[in-house]
Amino acid sequence: MSPPIWVIELAERFWAAAGPPSSYPRDLAEPALFGLGLVIKPVPGLTLAAVRDRLARNDLTCPADEPDRPLRACLFARAGAGFVYLDADDPPDERQFSLSHEVAHFLRDCDAPRRRVAARLGPAGLEVLDGKRPPTPAERLHAVLRDVPLAAHVHLLGRDDDGRPRSDAEREAEAAADRLAFELLAPAELLTSTGREACATSGFGGTGLPACATSGFGGTGLPACAVMDRLRDEFGFPPGPAADYARVLAPDPPTDPFFERIRKSW
């Protein structure tokens, strides 16, 4: 399944700014610093309170009025640059995916809007976007007519009691950041050559049923389990994101009631 055009464009823009990508698994720390101006800050036992404390030391205010909770990562960006805080206690593969996710947030939710404002309203529009001054009536009109945001960026840290994004905007932003993070670490075009034979002899639940017998191929010929294994072994994905990306590339087909009866009786 091909990625959306916006994913391809932002990934290409990132690597054009950061320089040629490294070998796999990719390490995004240096590209994020030199390509985007993001400073990476590993913090043991990262929490929202720890982020607030570190920002306060630099006379910066965290805009999120949320209860304290553990975090895998957090992005703070302003005026085209920022900090990425990572939980130093996470395994390396989890930290690398967390970094990619936050880089994706920066590209989609911070850098892309700034580029649109600068292109359509000029440098003066960035002063408004960065919260340095309110927009003039003329700037508000031009922003509406040219479909560009002028509001200063707000946080996407809202979560419900189960830790899930609270609003539709937060859910959309998190899903989009994951999709772009997948592409930054493992371009979809490199994963379209995995054949079905990779899982032909795998066991399923000790029954002898092929492990991919119920996996979707999404029209690409990609067994989901083979994609997931390759994402972990070759591209360094942690298990959760590997499974999520595999489902994107090889979605499950519609359930066939007859096949379900056979599978359950097996």
Image (cartoon, helix red, strand yellow):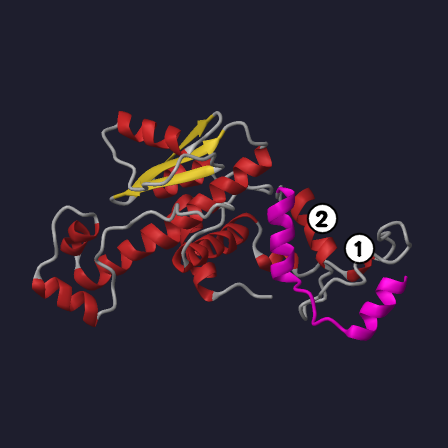
* Residue 32 appears in the figure: yes
Q: Quadrant of the N terminus?
A: bottom right
Quadrant of the rendered image containing residue 141: bottom left
Marks 2/1 in contact by CB < 8 Å: the verdict is: yes
Label of residue 229 in the image: 2
Which residue lies at the image location 70% right of the left edge and 69% below the top edge?
A: 253
Which residue lies at the image location 46% right of the left edge and 57% below the top edge?
A: 176
Q: What element carries label 1?
A: helix
In-front residue for pair 164/124: 164
Name the main secondary structure of what is drawn in magenta.
helix
Query: Which percent across, then down, holds residue 164?
Result: 49, 49
Query: Which percent across, then down, holds residue 219?
Result: 68, 71
Task: Give the CA distance from mark 2 to mark 1.
Answer: 10 Å
For badge 2, the amino acid type reads Asp
In-front residue for pair 155/104: 155
Query: Which percent across, then down, holds residue 43?
Result: 45, 27
| Image label count | 2
The residue tagged 1 is 198
